[in-house]
Amino acid sequence: MTQKEQLKLGKTLWNIADQLRGAMNADDFRDYMLSFLFLRYLSGNYEVAAERELGGDYPQLPEDDKRTPLGVWYRQNVEDVAMFEQQMRRKVHYVIKPEHLWSNISELARTQSADLLVTLEQGFRYIENESFANSFQGLFSEINLNSEKLGRTPTDRNKKLCTIIQKIAEGIADFSTDTDTLGDAYEYLIGQFAAGSGKKAGEFYTPQQISTILSEIVTLDSQDPATGKKPKLDHVLDFACGSGSLLLNVRKRITEHGGSIGRVYGQESNITTYNLARMNMLLHGMKDSEFDIYHGDSLLNHWELLNEMNPTKKREFDAIVANPPFSLRWDPNDALGEDFRFKNYGLAPKSAADFAFLLHGFHFLREDGTMAIILPHGVLFRGGAEERIRTKLLKDNNVDAVIGLPAGLFYSTGIPVCILVLKKCKHKEDVLFINASEHFEKGKRQNYLNEENIREIVDTYRFRKDRERYSRRVSMEEIEKNGFNLNISRYVSTAEEEVPVDLKLVNGQLAAINERIKSSTEKHNAFLRELGLDTI
């Protein structure tokens, strides 16, 4: 399917969502819509694998027979079901019972069956607790099938669910439902729901064009076309992963070049967003053994995997990407002052946890890894504790690049933001500044970066190019003279130089103008006197 067709599917599903949600809040309806799309993907993938596994034994039903073929096989081969499911766990890493498959659920919706609500609820619980070897407990915890937002009575709710599922089934029917297609549609819907969520969007969504920039930057070191070696990253982390789009973009960049990623890791504190991320990974074709998304607070280090007190589980990462909440207020205690992530730098101020997020990620970066993080511009020049942290990072030669982005790129804020690129082992003694603040396309709701804008940033970073009014490599000596202030406009100004003014020439021109005014006024007054009128 072409990108145009994938976008068309996304728009088709969004139109369905817009029509059906009625008075329901967009954020609430999002959870239903995306969960049903997720169930459609899991089911379709499972049925294709089951047909392949069973071969000639897979029931071929007449077109007018609305039964689920796999359900027919289950009833005819009861003694073989356990072995079949064992095989499916090995091959696709999960099992779905025939009655919980989308094909059965959508048929119940089409016939307005009173059993839909109960069957759907049982299916969600089965997927959470039994489908996968790794438990996905709580995956659908934010979807309340008994919510009065769906209807006042169970009958009303069942009827509403029948309508929603039937419309989704009809909308999808004319499109391919492979991983790429449904994955892109899922991402499109997340973006559309983010557009309608205002400031809440920052909790779960990084615009795709910015995600692409971060992903390309952190994967550059793994690519070396000269050697012909395929790129490889062992471990990738996003410690504020939202819906997981940044992690998926990193994976996409590597696989596009024929490479591979060992495992991706994400952490997310918002339970709804955490569930979105887990669905997003699976829906993009990742097996449950290829990712680990954790629900917890990164600042409090709520994850044994990243906890230095448990060295057998601690990881270091080849690539780290993040778009944490901007200038989040936090309340660090004395114990955090001695935390292994912060003790060499000091704590970020209570008013803005930006550097706390940065130091958290930076601690787990491998010696030869790359980290790219989106932060508000204030981290570049604010004083106090932030100045001390910034100064140490610069003196230790850990800041590789500062990239200034245009304003209005995010749904959650109109302020311009920057990307900080950090390395523990940096070969260059300078810092690359890129001022891309004026290179964008203007949109109705927000601005966006086109492909040329994105390529311009990535290529400038990759080749560390100096370009007038756009980018410059700045020595540490110059940065130190500026008090370790990283305000981008100090080093790369977008202001055009004023044309030199020849004051002597201008003075002569003004004198000539005054003479003409004097002469014209005298002529005018002569006419007025002839007419017997007062002169000027």
Image (cartoon, rainbow, N blue to C red):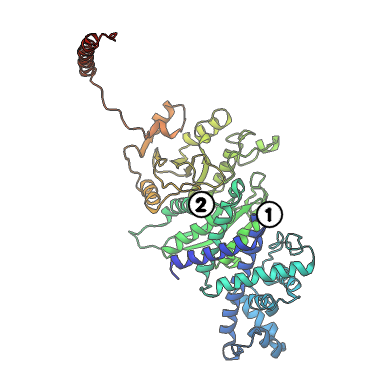
Q: Say which residue label 1 marks.
A: 271
Quadrant location, the C terminus: top left
Q: Is residue 301 above or below residue 153?
A: above
Disc nearer the start of the sequence (2/1)? 2
**Residue shown at the point (47%, 30%) measured from the top left:** 485
Q: Nearer the viewer, residue 356 or 279?
A: 279
Residue 321 horizontal/vertical position (percent): 52, 50
Residue 22 appears in the figure: yes
Between label 2 and label 1, give the one nearer the viewer.
2
Q: Is residue 207 above or below residue 131?
A: above
**Residue shown at the point (42%, 30%) measured from the top left:** 479
Residues packed near mark 2 inside 10 Å, few (<14), some (14 to 19) or many (20 plus)? some
> SS of the residue at dot 2?
loop
Q: Is residue 73 left or right of residue 385?
A: right
Q: Is residue 192 left or right of residue 493?
A: right
Quadrant location, the N terminus: bottom left
Q: Is residue 342 left or right of residue 143?
A: left
Q: Say which residue label 2 marks.
A: 207
Look at the numbered discs 2 and 1 and tell me whether their residues touch, using CB distance below 8 Å.
no
Q: Is residue 423 above or below residue 346?
A: below
**Residue type of the residue flagged with mark 1:** Ile
> SS of the residue at dot 1?
helix
